[in-house]
Image: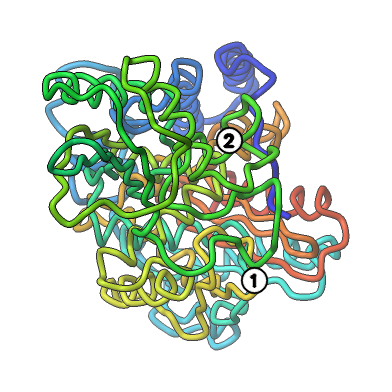
């Protein structure tokens, strides 16, 4: 079952202050200027992440400023900063866009890494090979590392082996949704009235983040319009027809996901939490409609009886509308918190955009078709759901790393929320409780986690000491200890941050 998500128990700014002091000590102990600059730059990025985490909440995208900077940056890749910045600290030095290989000969000892320069492949084999042999990684483990500036595969082990990805499949879901709909797309919840305004319908558009405040605003707008028409009593229905197929996920009733419905409030949660496992409603649409009816009563519009399911008449007209946060913000929240409800909504919104049925099968077809347009390696891939809770999901390490590389591509700025939504090691989302304070990867690694019984995965990005932005994917199955497997995956990612040529 996927990992619960809780807010960090530490103050990110306190933690970063300690890390900054540690960096000063490290320099006094003799690190060269280039290494110190790289570490300082990394800590600067971590500080930015910590400030965002501390500030909260999701302000039209969790890291909007960072995303805007990334979309506007120059096309050289690596850590090159946009020239001519008017303010802010001096930029970290940029790495060359392409590594100069020592030899043009393909290293046949590493067939999965045939696209990499020979020296880079050898260095990564020496670094990752021993770590991948850790028994904690279970019976099958695969890995891919890509230089995002050149799209070169620097390392691969079992790169094309389909594996159960758990929640890292959310990366594929997010890329497909952003590609199909764009980062500015918003999901609408509407209220429609019959021609005589005696019947109204609350129409769900598929926004799982709809909350009571939004329903109250909808009720107020609806009541104002109805009163202007001289109406004080109405019949209330609610419409969930935008989604089709079974509402219940194949895993059955579960605290990690509510029934998938086009109409719900607060993801069907029955407590005050906004992330992680929680008791869920068996009837999220009915609950939302009943709450809306009560708010209508408070606004001076009486309902004749309890709300019933039904579609509005063909001649009905909209009288109120609420729009969700932009898709970019929904993607970031889904990735940072490993939010299953939002992920399933993203898959269905992708299906609707593609003209498919908004159900599990339609989502699978739509996501596959959208990723195919991006020329990604889809052999063996299967997107049985959008969240990764289904063990029938299959992806390769090559596909996951490729998705992240595509999100870093300057030709695809619409995909940038996939990178800005990745949890920051030791600070946010599902990585807030991982990576020790003194770990070299803390604050430097951004990655999506995945956890099911016997399955542990990690896919994300990191800037190495040469200044290259690397996309990586590590997948393990047959694991017996989640904590030990996670530690091994964290060590693999950390090795990329501290590796030297």
Q: Say which residue label 2 marks.
A: 429
Mark 1 is surrounded, within 10 Å at the Cα level, by few (under 14), some (14 to 19) or many (20 or more) other residues, namely: many
Relative to the observer, which residue lies in front, 417 or 360? 360
Relative placement, left or right, of 180 versus 366 is left
Relative to the observer, which residue lies in front, 442 or 302? 302
Residue 164 numbered mark, or none: 1
Q: Position of residue 146 (x, y in %)?
A: 44, 64
Mark 2 is surrounded, within 10 Å at the Cα level, by few (under 14), some (14 to 19) or many (20 or more) other residues, namely: many
**Where 58 falls versus 71 (above or below)?**
above
Label 2 close to label 1 by CB (< 8 Å): no
Q: Residue furthest bottom?
A: 108
Element type at mark 1:
loop
Relative placement, left or right, of 307 versus 149 is right
Residue at x 56% of width, y 62% of height: 473
Q: Position of residue 129 (x, y in %)?
A: 70, 67
**Where 62 falls versus 284 (above or below)?**
above
CA–CA distance in space, label 2 to label 1: 22 Å
Element type at mark 2:
helix
Residue 175 shows in this picture: yes
Residue at x 37% of width, y 53% of height: 310
Residue 464 shows in this picture: no
Identify the image quadrant of the N terminus: bottom right
């Amino acid at each position: 079952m996927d990992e619960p998500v809780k807010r960090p128990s530490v103050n990110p700014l306190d933690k970063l202050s300690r890390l900054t002091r540690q960096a000063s000590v490290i320099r006094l102990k003799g690190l060269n200027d280039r290494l110190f600059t790289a570490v300082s730059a990394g800590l600067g990025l971590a500080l930015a992440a910590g400030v965002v985490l501390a500030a909260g909440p999701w302000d039209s995208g969790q890291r909007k400023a960072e995303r805007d900077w990334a979309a506007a940056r120059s096309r050289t890749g690596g850590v090159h900063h946009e020239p001519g910045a008017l303010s802010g600290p001096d930029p970290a030095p940029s790495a060359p866009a392409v590594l100069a290989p020592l030899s043009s000969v393909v290293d046949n000892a590493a067939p999965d890494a045939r696209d990499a320069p020979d020296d880079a492949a050898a260095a990564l084999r020496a670094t990752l090979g021993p770590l991948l042999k850790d028994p904690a990684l279970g019976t099958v483990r695969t890995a891919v590392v890509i230089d995002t500036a050149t799209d070169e595969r620097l390392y691969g082990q079992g790169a094309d082996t389909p594996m159960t990805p758990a929640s890292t499949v959310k990366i594929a879901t997010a890329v497909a949704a952003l590609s199909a709909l764009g980062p500015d797309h918003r999901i609408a919840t509407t209220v429609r009235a019959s021609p005589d305004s005696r019947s109204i319908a609350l129409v769900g558009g598929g926004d799982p983040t709809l909350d009571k405040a939004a329903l109250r605003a909808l009720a107020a707008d609806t009541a104002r319009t109805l009163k202007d028409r001289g109406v004080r009593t109405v019949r209330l229905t609610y419409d969930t027809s935008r989604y089709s197929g079974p509402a219940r996920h194949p895993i059955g009733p579960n605290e990690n996901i509510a029934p998938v419905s086009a109409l719900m409030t607060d993801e069907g949660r029955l407590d005050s939490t906004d992330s992680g496992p929680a008791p869920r409603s068996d009837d999220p649409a009915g609950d939302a409609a009943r709450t809306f009816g009560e708010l209508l009563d408070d606004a001076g519009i009486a309902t004749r009886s309890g709300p019933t399911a039904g579609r509005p008449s063909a001649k009905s007209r909209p009288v109120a509308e609420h729009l969700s946060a932009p898709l970019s913000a929904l993607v970031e929240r889904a990735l940072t918190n490993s939010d299953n409800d939002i992920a399933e909504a993203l898959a269905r919104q992708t299906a609707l955009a593609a003209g498919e049925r908004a159900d599990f099968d339609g989502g699978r077809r739509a996501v596959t078709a959208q990723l195919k347009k991006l020329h990604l390696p889809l052999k063996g891939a299967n997107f049985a759901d959008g969240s990764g809770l289904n063990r029938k999901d299959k992806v390769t390490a090559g596909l996951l790393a490729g998705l992240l590389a595509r999100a870093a591509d300057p030709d695809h700025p619409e995909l940038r929320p996939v990178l800005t939504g990745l949890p920051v090691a030791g600070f946010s989302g599902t990585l807030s409780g991982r990576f020790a304070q003194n770990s070299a990867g803390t604050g430097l690694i951004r990655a999506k986690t995945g956890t099911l019984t016997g399955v542990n995965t990690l896919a994300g990005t990191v800037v190495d000491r040469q200044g290259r932005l690397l996309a990586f994917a590590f997948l393990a199955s047959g694991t017996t200890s989640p904590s030990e497997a996670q530690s091994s995956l964290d060590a693999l990612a950390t090795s990329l941050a501290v590796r030297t040529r």
